Amino acid sequence: GLAVTGLPTGVTAVFSPVQSVLSGTAPATTRLSFTLAAGAVAGTYAVTISGLSGTVSNTASMTLVVATPTFTLGETNAGLVVPRGGSGATTVIVQALNGFASPVKFTAVNVPAGVTASFGAETTAGTSLLTLTTGSTAAPGTYMVTILGTSGTIQTQAAVSLTVTAASLMIGVSPASLTVASGTTATAMVSATAVGGFNGNVTFSAAGLPAG
């Protein structure tokens, strides 16, 4: 018969088939399957496989590694460009590994002053939405915000780049060139476009005009 010793708690081993018939010099094979319960302790174990036929026996050794349940984090948008006074979002992806099946709690660190971070619900294996909102006091620039995922003693992280743009105006004129005869009037259309969350009144003036 076949047997396995040295198994850690929470691990069971099954042979299929449990017996093999040797004939001549051809080797006999069987499949050895290991099943891990939820409480199996992670680690590296020396396992001994023994075979017995009447009074004849022998053993073989193997190493069994019980992996630690864990998870990784990723995001769908690693670079956010947000105008001051606006908001941007990225989806945080949780990838479960080695049988991980516990809720993950999210926090954001290295968040610049004037910026707030909010997450969706905790998740085991799926996604959560991170929203970064910039206030009027947020300083323009590029920042690296760290996303921390924590579940019990397990913690992993991902990073997202946040670029805060300043509020400003874009002034356009059409046409860009005018030819005006003496004693006549010509017209151009001037436009003002808000950039970076600008909100306010715009006063237009012209400079560089020739005399008359």
Image (spheres, rainbow, N blue to C red):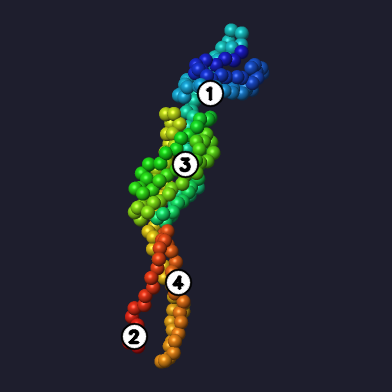
Pointer 2: what residue?
Answer: 210
Pointer 4: what residue?
Answer: 191
Q: CA distance from mark 1 to mark 3?
A: 29 Å
- Point 46% across, 46% down: residue: 131
Q: Nearer the viewer, residue 158 or 121?
A: 121
N-terminal-most mark, 1 or 2: 1
Pointer 3: what residue?
Answer: 119
Please tell me how crowded label 2 is: few (under 14), some (14-19), or many (20+) other residues with Cα within 10 Å: few
N-terminal-most mark, 1 or 4: 1
Q: CA distance from mark 3 to mark 2?
A: 58 Å
Compared to residue 124, the image places residue 192 above or below, namely below
Task: Kindly identify the amino acid type of the residue bearing the numbered disc 1.
Answer: Ala
Please tell me how crowded label 3 is: few (under 14), some (14-19), or many (20+) other residues with Cα within 10 Å: some
Q: Is the N terminus in the top left, top right, bottom left or bottom right quadrant?
A: top right
Mark 1 or 4: the one toward you: 4
- Residue 25 located left or right of residue 170: right
N-terminal-most mark, 3 or 2: 3
Q: CA distance from mark 4 to mark 3?
A: 39 Å
